[in-house]
Amino acid sequence: MSKVKYYYDSDTLSYRKIERKKRTTFKYAMIFLLAAAFFAFIFVFVGSQYIESPKERALKRELQNAQLQFELLNKKMEHAEAVLSNIADRDNTIYRVYFEANPIPDEQRRAGFGGINRYKNLEGFDNSKLIIESNKRLDILQKQIVIQSKSLDEIASLAAEKEKLLAAIPAIQPVSNEDLTRMASGYGMRSDPFTKVRKMHKGMDFTAPRGTPIYATGDGVVKRADSRATGYGKHIRIDHGYGYMSLYAHLYKYNVKRNQKVKRGDLIGFVGSTGRSQAPHLHYEIHKDKKAINPINFYYGSLTADEFNKLLEHASLENQSLD
């Protein structure tokens, strides 16, 4: 209930009730509404720029967190790029050189993506530049990882093939030093024991007692174990692959048969004096691409430096061969 107001009338010397005119009431009401509208405008359009709502504060925190995550992601990519760069350097300068493969050019490793704009859908946002740059780096990094992965697959394949090659090459002496009497004759021009004429001796002669074990000098497959070759008597031929073949002649007996797979160091036969031979010994040859080569270069797998030097000294003497 509104209060009733009075005023003192000096003419009548009495108090009279103040009667508010409707026009005045309407005026006051309009003034109040205008003032309310003005303050509302100030609050909505001006105050809202300085006063954050809970939703705005939440969105702002999410944006700050997103920016932080992008910064962390970029740091992780920097680390990944450094690691990948180190692997690529070793790949080009060590692995691919060792296995005789051509290095991968840097422009191929670090190439970007040409053609259409792959990031058009990321444009038009407040942080578009940050997002696009991060995506570009990530895409290039993924491409580099794919290239490096394929390179390492190739290196693994080459390594496996290299391991087979190293195992296949005839690399040990066919007769153990403990069983060896002496190295009688080496590769080169020698005097024939029967005709006394100098001719090419295509292998090395190891003198040893009859029945001395003979070992395969590398992995391979026995292609022959017979006496059907002139002058060799009972002999064995092993195909090592990669163009290499080893021959063991004048055997007493075999310990392998044709088409049998052998490993380096396997016992394949025994020293004898069959065929064109003056005394029990092993005549040993190595062929590369069907051409006889000096076996002296293939004993790195079984001899010490001193043993090899002594063998080299004896092999260099132009003496008489035993076959």
Image: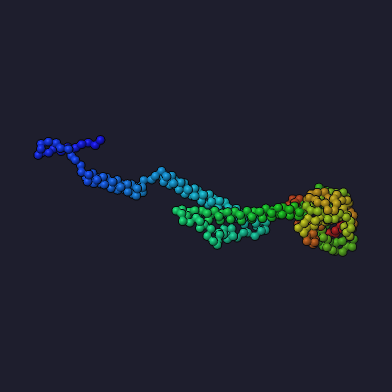
Question: From the viewer's perspective, is 12 left or right of 76?
Answer: left
- Residue 102 in the image, given as x and y percentages of width and height: 65, 60
Question: From the viewer's perspective, is 66 left or right of 300?
Answer: left
Q: Nearer the viewer, residue 292 or 261?
A: 261
Q: Nearer the viewer, residue 280 or 129?
A: 129
- Residue 263 in the image, given as x and y percentages of width and height: 78, 50
- In this rendering, the count of numbered labels is 0
The residue sitting at 77% across, 56% down in the picture is 241
- Residue 194 lies, with reference to residue 46, above or below; the image says below
What is the quadrant of the C terminus in the image?
bottom right
Question: From the viewer's perspective, is 323 left or right of 288?
Answer: right
Viewer can see residue 180: no
The residue sitting at 83% across, 50% down in the picture is 268
Residue 88 placement: quadrant: bottom right
Q: Nearer the viewer, residue 19 or 262?
A: 19
Viewer can see residue 123: yes
